[in-house]
Amino acid sequence: MQERQAFANWITAMPKAELHVHIDGTLTASRLLDRAAKHGVDLPYGSVEDVTKAYDFDNLQSFLDLYYLGTGVIRDEEDFYLLMLDYLTTCREQHITHTEIMVEPQSYLPKGVSLATMMSGFKQAVDEAQAGWGQSVLLILSLLRHLPEEDGIDVLELAHSSFPGSFVAIGLASSEVGHPPVGFTELYARARSLGYRTTAHAGEEGPASFVADSLDLLGVERIDHGIRSAEDPALVVRLAREQIPLTVCPLSNVKLKVFERLEDHNLLEALDAGVKVTVNSDDPTYFGGFLNENFIALHEHLLLDGKRAARLTRNAFEASFLPAKAKADKLAELDRYLTDHPSP
Ligand code: ADE
Ligand code: ZN
C-alpha cells in the first residue's frame, strides 16, 4: 500500500477529539440549498458547484460574510437538528469520538429565532448520536466579538438561566482585528463566576499580544488558533511552560490566508517547542475538510509523522473540557489503538 494511503487509513481509524468547530461552519452546500428552498430564501447560488465556487476567501471577514449568510437559512427546530446531525454523523465516520462544538446564538436571536428552538433541535441530534453510537459531545457558548460586550453578557445570562448545564464553556469568535480582548473582561469574569470553562479566539488575524491579553485579562484556559504567538518568542516559552492548549486549524489558516501555503504553517514548530498544540477543522465545509482531511493534508504538505500525529491527538483529549474520568477513558482508548496499530 502507498505510504500516503497507509497514513490516511491509520489516522482515520484513530479515535480523535475535536475542540474547535463552529456548528454553523459545518453547514454543507447541499443542506444550505435544501433549507433555502424549504424557507423560500433567495440565494445567489443555484447549485452545489455555485456554492463551493464562493469558498474563495481573501481574509477572515470575506469568509464571515458568507458564513453569516448561511445562518439565514437555518430557522426552525428541524433545521438545527439536521445541521447538528449532519456534523455528528461525520464525526462517527471520521472516528471523532469526542467533540466540543461552538454554538453562536447571536447569529439567530436578532432574526427572531429563539434559543429554545436552537437548543431543542441540537439536543435531539446530540441525544440520538449519544444513544446511537456513544458520541461524546460538549457545547461551547461562543459569543461574537463584533457585537457589544453587554450583548454577550445578556446571551450568557439567558443560556445560563434557560439551559443550565447545557454549555460547558464560553468562547469568543468573529472579527478579531478591532475587537481586542480588553473589551470582554466583564463577560469572562461573569462566566468564570458562574462556573464556565473558558476559551477565546486569539492570534488568528490579531497580534500575539491578543493571546497574552486573553490569558491575562480574560483568564482563558485555552486559545483558539494562537498561531501568531510565534511572533513573540517569550510568549511561546510561556505557552509551553504553562501548557496552554492551542486549538489550531491548519486548512482554515490557509483558506483565510493567514499562511499562504500549508508548507509555511508553524504548528509543528510550536509542538516541538513543547506547546500543547491540537488539530481542528474550524469551519470544515467552508475550508475544504473535516478533521481527518486536516491531518492528511499536514502529512502531505508538512511531513507530519505518526509520532507527532499521535501527540496531537493525545493533546486534544488532554486539553478537552471533559471531566477527569471521561478524559482518562478516552486517553486509555487512544492508547489501546496506538498499541494495536503502530503508526505506519
Ligand atoms: N467564526 C467562525 N470561524 C471563525 C474563525 N476562523 N475566526 C473567527 N471567528 C470565526
Ligand atoms: Zn474558529
Image: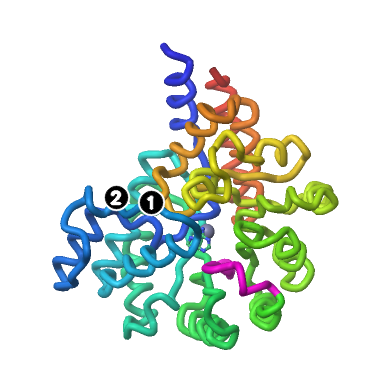
Is 151 situated above or below 340? below
Classify mark 1: residues with Cα within 10 Å, few (<14), some (14-19) or many (20+): few
Q: Residue at x 38, y 64 (%)?
A: 67
* 173 is within the stretch colored magenta: yes
Q: Is residue 228 left or right of residue 92?
A: right
* Mark 2–mark 1 CB contact (< 8 Å): yes
Is 105 situated above or below 89? below
Query: Which amino acid type is shown beneath numbered disc 2?
Result: Lys
Q: Quadrant of the C terminus?
A: top right
Q: Does the closest atom of ligand 1 sit within 8 Å of the Cβ of label 2?
A: no
Q: Residue at x 49, y 53 (%)?
A: 282
Residue 344 in sight in this render: yes
Query: Which amino acid type is shown beneath numbered disc 1?
Result: Asp
Please name whichever residue, 274 or 255, is drawn nearer the observer in this view of the structure.
255
Q: List the single residue furthest toward the top.
A: 1
Check disc 1 and report its element: helix, strand or loop.
Answer: loop
* Residues drawn in magenta: 168-181
Check disc 2 and report its element: helix, strand or loop.
Answer: helix
Is 92 situated above or below 110? above
Q: How is the image coloured?
A: rainbow
Q: Position of residue 310 (x, y in %)?
A: 61, 32
- Give me the C-alpha separation between circle 2 and circle 1: 7 Å
Q: Residue at x 57, y 29 (%)?
A: 336
Q: Position of residue 54 (x, y in %)?
A: 32, 54
Q: What numbered label is drawn on residue 56?
A: 1
Please name whichever residue, 144 or 338, is drawn nearer the observer in this view of the structure.
144
List the residue tagged with mark 2: 53
Please name whichever residue, 330 or 270, is drawn nearer the observer in this view of the structure.
270
Residue 194 in sight in this render: no
Please name whichever residue, 310 or 38, is drawn nearer the observer in this view of the structure.
38
